[in-house]
Image (cartoon, coloured by chain):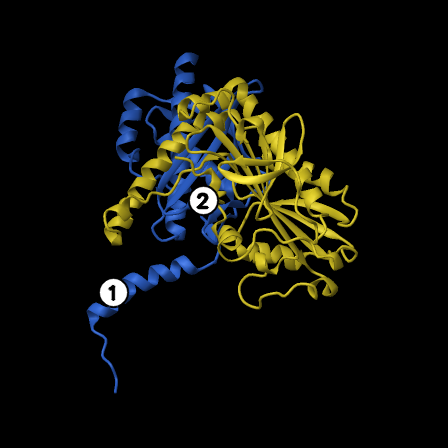
Amino acid sequence: MRFRYLRIFVLFPVLFACACGTISPYQPLPGAAMDKLSSTDVAVPIAQSEIFVFVPASNVGAATGGGLLGALIDAGVNDVRTTKANDASKTLRDALIDFNFDNVLQADLKASLSQVALLHADNVHVIKEVTSDNLDHVLDASKAAAVLFATTEYHVSNDGDVLSVILSAALFPRSDELKALVKSSNSGPKTLLTNALYRNVFTFETKAPGATGDRDHDMAAWSADHGAPMRAALTMATAKLSAMLAADIQRPAGATGDTGAPVKVDERPGTVVGSDADGTVVRFADGTMIFATQSELRP
Amino acid sequence: MSKNISPARAALFAIVALPLAACATSEPINLSSQFTPPAPKWSPATDRVEKNAHGSCRMHLSGVQDVRADTQSMGTMVERGVHAADSVGWVRSGVESLDRDPRLSFAEPAKVEFGITLEKAYIHSMGTEKAATVVLRATYAPNDTQIFRGDDNSLNWNNTASETQEGLDAALARALEALDQDIVARCAKAG
């Protein structure tokens, strides 16, 4: 069974809940804001320090009738699954020990966003402590007119065959004239997605070379040659996601629907909005986007 | 009319509400600079006897460095940032505990000399789990380095500072076990 389509932010449950539970994950940048972004700080929260295997939460307990006993059963099952997943990914993590994902993403975002004239982006910096308090602190401490958060997570699927890199972008106002354009909530963290001028979720997916869905086999494939396939995939992911964010944040609020070919990714229907030699960019009906290499697509 | 609360109800409230309150806090977790072995795997008292009986592999620790970009951040436990004020001190105290192994001692002239860099150290909560990892790099010579990884996965009972410390200590202990074995093997080769 696949869980990829859930687009789960394992390490950022609060952000995920905001994106999928109550509000649309996509909010275009208001036209009125485009000439008011005199400066933008770019913060890149990346909680993790290494790649990990996404372990789906157990719901075995529900089958037993739920309750406290069910919860304890689920906790035990999750413990075993997590331990096995970590053991399985040890070789891959060792192979990537000198690969600095944070620096690669930071450099790509800096390069891509510096080309977006309306942002006047500067000061791209990674944040390792991803808590609501700390993100609010980063927002409050900024002297720029706005702060663009590009919260990112990367993991391989439970089967080990698919790499997913997920970037959740949210632009928060700092200047008074930008604050006037968004109806901010007075309760909860300042960096709740409902307070953002612009937001969207971008995903990159690709498969391991010769993927079979057998975790041990696929981990070995990713880890081969000092982790070269995974290094290449992560490097491609940061470049594609940075470019997608740079393009999307300039998309006019009233843009009409995309007219590309229909396509399905993980059974989700979407529309092709671009492609290159590496893969295809697809926009889903809710506005979120994915870059999928050819192995991930079907008509 | 006042309503009496029975001791049983009060106890139930304490059991249920206090952990929830602990979970809800966003107060950062500040880690100790001292490594504490998770279990009495090495027993110093008995080890000393064995050390005298078996002799020891003499080693020298040339230094400890933390090469992470952010040397204070050690991950997050739900909404609590995990901070280390002295990550180098924590690792050093762990490495210095290697002499609890009866085969090893920090003494001159050393048969094995090494430096330690902390490559990774983090703990994260994921659902009902918490996962801690510590990765050390031992440098015996400029072209002779070795990576030692320690992972610890366990239930996140209550998101507390003590269980966070225990998780990271357990991960460091596992990395140190592998380092211990490597040093012993090198000593044996050195004769």
Residue at which label 1 appears: B12
Indicate the colour of chain B. blue
Vertical relation: B174 (above or below) B159? above
Q: Residues within 10 Å of mark 2 (few under 14, many from 20)?
A: many
Q: Is residue B53 left or right of residue B62?
A: left
| Letter of the chain that mark 2 sits on in the rendering | B
Residue type highlighted by circle 1: Leu
Tag 2 and tag 1 share a subunit: yes
* Total residue callouts: 2
N-term-proximal mark, 2 vs 1: 1
Rounded to the nearest whole Å, what is the CA distance between mark 2 and mark 1? 29 Å
Q: Quadrant of the N terminus of chain A?
A: top left
Residue at which label 2 appears: B124
Residue in the image at 33% along x and 21% along y: B55
Indicate the colour of chain A. yellow
**Labelled disc at residue A269:** none
Q: Residue furthest bottom?
A: B1
Q: Is residue A166 left or right of residue A55?
A: right
Secondary structure at badge 2 equals strand
Vertical relation: B186 (above or below) A165? above
Vertical relation: A191 (above or below) A86? below
Q: Quadrant of the C terminus of chain A?
A: top right
Secondary structure at badge 1 equals helix
Q: Residues within 10 Å of mark 1 (few under 14, many from 20)?
A: few
Quadrant assignment, res A113: top right
| Residues at discs 2 and 1 in contact (Cβ within 8 Å) | no
Q: In the image shown, does B13 or A109 lie closer to the viewer?
A: A109
Residue A54, percent across and down?
Answer: 44, 37
Q: Is residue B157 left or right of residue A277?
A: left
Asked if residue B155 shows in the view, the reply is yes
